[in-house]
Image (cartoon, rainbow, N blue to C red):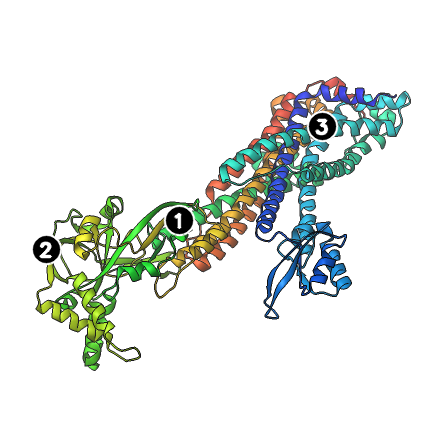
Amino acid sequence: MKNYKTVALRYLQLNKRRNVITVCGTAFTVLLLYILLNAGFSYLDIEKEAVLRKSNYEMILYTETIEDIQAISADAVVKEAKVGGWYEKWQGKNYEQALYVTGDNPYRMDKNFEYLCKTYGVEGEINQDLAPFYLQGYEGDSIYVQTLLLLCVSYIFALFGVGVIRNSIQLSIFEQIKDYGNMRCIGATKGQLKMIIYLQGLMLELLGILLGVVIGQVGMSLVCLLISFEMRFHVLPCFLIVFAYMLDLYFVMQDNCRLVTEMSPMSALRGEFRIRKEKIKRRRKSLYGRLFGVEGDYAYKNLMRSPGRFFKSVGAMFFGIAALIAFLGISDYVNRYYDVINRICRYYQVFYYDPLYCDGTIAEVQKNLPPLDYFEGISKIQAVQEAKKVYMAEVAVADVTDFINHFAKDHPFYMDFADYKKRDETRIEQEAYYASKMMCYGYDDEDYARYESRLVAGTLDVSENGIVLINGAEYMVAEDETLKNVWDSITYTTYQVGDTIDIIDPEKLRQMIVERLAKIPKGTEYNYPQICTECKKALREQGAYKTYVVEGIVDFDCNIENYDLSIILPLEHYYAFTNTDESYVTGMQYHIEGDLSAANIATLDYFDPVRFCTTSSYIEFVGVVGQIRLILRYILIFAIFLVIVTSANIVNTTASNIQMRRKEFAQLRVIGVSQKGLIKMVVLEGVITTIVTNFLGIAVGNVISYIVYIFMNMIMGIEFSIPWEGILLGLLYSVVVFCGSAYIGIKSMKQNVAGDLAISGE
């Protein structure tokens, strides 16, 4: 025999449908691995380019003389050299003529640096930002570890992909076992038979790799569109894929070859399969026998005849089901966790403002805000769906006594003021001043209309002299014994619709306070509340105040996280109320939808706690959510990968198992088992496998989701729940795979009782 390729092609053509499934299964594993590897290498490329734009050099040498600069620049290992200043922060020394050097080979960066320093007697440092990309510098070893990790991941993916081919070729061998026996009888050597088997595996694998790479390239383009990330083609991933898959194929095909080479030619001609025989012994009825009758006992006996194959099938599928259950369980926690965050942080989760206080000017406010390009940068973040200007100003009531008398018992200031009144008369004036101020917010039509859902009395359609009060707050108190969140609400005042509040003219109050403070010599102590109170009293006596009617009351602020009694107004009313206009911008506020990356969070987290207010808790919470969602993506990819590849393996394994038991099925038919009863026996094997698989998968999946639940519950209380959707989905999927493959396998097997009985195997 000389032409092994023709024989291998013939066997592949005989099983076109199965081989198409095999190639597709292999291509799927290649597709995922190809995108994963290219994404990793593309990320490294992008990071390296960012470093090169910032610092395009390999090392800095602390040269001080022209002679050293000229000598080093002329050295053969130096490709490019530039002179510039450098401040060495550890020594605190400034080098005005440091040499920025790029060597002849970036992968020899360490050696070139050591050579130049030793040869010319200079000191310096390697560009540690650039060096790791060339496996150099302090962090070069970490790149080695990452490379080994990539190789390990490639090998694991290849193991699954080649497993599909192994089962397909094994089934083909069982079907063509007599042909191999004939070839042995006419003189074919074991090596020649091995070559036929290896060629079949090689052809299927190369087709799978080629198809996976082609689809992977298309998939990369789609991923780039969806996540705005530039993925580039790299040769190295192709090499890693081919190397890992070929390595796995070599060892896997060895097992298939033994099925033929370790069998005598006569056994092969008789179609004999080596199935482990058992001693005859009395058996008690198993659990499955009690559930499903004698067919259940028979199914369980057959599964335990080859426990290794049974537990491989269970193990492969249960990991996928566990990952699926964990994904859906954790997703539910994340969604509820995110709902709690948004409930706490309101609509504008992130906001930066410096209010226009009674003692300030708009020029000072806008000077203290972050720069304009910072605000614009935040607006460009993909997760930022809406950005609005903030208009807020502080106002003071004219009649402090009447205002405080309206405080409800829930108001945080109520008890404090009563206590101060008993023991500290000097404190009354100070605290009364702080308690008699409110913040007023101006909103556009869209933001103002959002309060309609929180309106408890009156209307939002206020008149020229009308105001709307935010008269309370909702907040999370704690967690009860069941770890459920306990929410509470407070009401600040007893104001009702129709009540009036006198407000000092905000512009005149700001001017008077600023003038009084400007007259105080620097370094002189002064009583700030007393000055403000005197200014308010003077303006009240002058009649510089206006009476406003409470025309609407909302129970809490739904736009921002606000826990103070406040006034909200439409923008036009706000301008008139505070004596300002649209140029009096006091900050920006942002509505976030989706995940924020670590870099985005770092950009948002910019504030002076004294002057600015940002929902920093949201930034902390959403960072946790982003990390968990990243883990979820990996879990989902892992689950999809496992269930698809494992399904192909199980279908092929079940088919090969049925082919091996043809004589056994023929014997059962002879003793009176009907075709329907035979199908029931085989399908029950799938049922038993499904029960065991789901028992383990549900247990492990819930353990994983519970561990994540504990982690999340440490930060924000959420209620534990069982992911019933994942359990049901995993159960349905496993039933389809195990029972479906068994049913199709036995249903499609050609029934030849006489021929099958002639097989001289078990």
Residue at 61% in and 48% down: 48
Q: Say which element carries label 2.
A: loop
Q: Distance between the residues labelled 3 and 1?
A: 54 Å
Identify the residue position indicated by label 3 in the image: 204
Neighbourhood count class around disc 3 (C-alpha, 10 Å): few under 14, some 14–19, many 20 upward:
many
- How many numbered discs, if any? 3
Whichever of callouts 3 and 1 sits on the residue coming sooner in the sequence is 3
Question: How far from the left and from the top, in percent, is residue 762?
Answer: 78, 30
Image coordinates for residue 121, horizontal then vertical, percent: 74, 66
| Residue at the spot of label 2 | 498
Dot 2 amino acid type: Gly
**Image quadrant where residue 474 sits:** bottom left
From the image, tell me which residue sits under label 1: 376
Q: Where is residue 522 in the image (x, y as percent from the top left)?
A: 30, 77
Residues under numbered marks 3 and 1 in contact, where contact means CB atoms less than 8 Å apart: no
As drawn, which residue projects farthest toward the bottom? 423
* Mark 2 crowd level (few <14, some 14–19, many ≥20, 10 Å Cα): few
* Amino acid type, residue under disc 3 in the picture: Leu
Is residue 412 at all visible to an observer of this figure?
Answer: yes
Of the numbered discs 2 and 1, the one sitting upstream in the chain is 1
